[in-house]
Amino acid sequence: MRTIMPQWYHLQQEAYGLKGDLKVQKLQAALAAAQGFKQADHYPESEVLFTLAVYFSEQNKQGEAEKYLREAIALKQAGLAISMAGKQNTPPENGIYLPAYSEKESELAAKKHALANCQSWLGRTLLAEHKFGEAALVLEQSIALMDSSSKPDGEVILLPDTLRPYAQALRALKRNGEADKADARAAKIMASRRLLLD
């Protein structure tokens, strides 16, 4: 049987090859299609919102990025309590549920990672906006979520990329001792990552 990908997914993929207003318009169409897909855990909408946020962040439009990240985080948090593992879409012409998981444990781990990633991006966005207190809080939440996984230091890319801006936010708040610890932890993970690559 042929796998049918949902429309929102195709539109989001098409957006990656576009720039400027055309990209935003395609992503807005993907968002509308994702909302119409009505996946119970809101994964489609949260992913398109996250993609929009990353685009605006790259354009240095932090206010827009913050807005979309907050929406994506709210949906991802709600989606943690809803398991889609093993479910099939009906009717099949609407496309499959994405991502497809056979086990609840692997689904929950992936959802926690996606939420932590969104929180990390929001924290970095808030840092760029000089909202240091809120940035530190959001980045701390992201780190705590990663630390709650079965392999916390296995987050060898996301964790140091979250710890370093967390340290910056802490320094701006004159919490230098905590900042030093965050920087040291990031450096340790980066060193172990280099050893794995050698």
Image (spheres, rainbow, N blue to C red):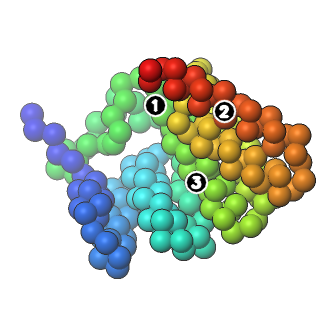
- Relative to 158, say whether 11 is above or below: below
Q: Nearer the viewer, mark 3 or mark 2?
A: 2
Secondary structure under tag 3 reads: helix
Residue drawn at point x = 33 percent, y = 56 percent: 37
Q: Residue 187: x and y, percent?
A: 66, 32
Labels 3 and 1 touching (C-beta < 8 A): no
Q: CA distance from mark 2 to mark 1?
A: 30 Å
Q: Is residue 194 visible?
A: yes
The disc at residue 121 is 3
Residue drawn at point x = 33 percent, y = 42 percent: 98
Residue kind at label 2, given as amino acid type:
Ala
Residue kind at label 3, given as amino acid type:
Trp
Residue kind at label 1, given as amino acid type:
Glu
- Relative to 99, say whether 17 is above or below: below
- Relative to 35, say whether 77 is above or below: above
Residue drawn at point x = 53 percent, y = 56 percent: 72
Q: Which residue is mark 1?
A: 107
Give the mark nearer the N terminus: 3 vs 2.
3
**Mark 2 crowd level (few <14, some 14–19, many ≥20, 10 Å Cα):** some
Give the mark nearer the N terminus: 2 vs 1.
1
Q: Which residue is mark 2?
A: 187
Nearest to the observer: residue 11 or residue 75: 11
Residue drawn at point x = 26 percent, y = 56 percent: 13
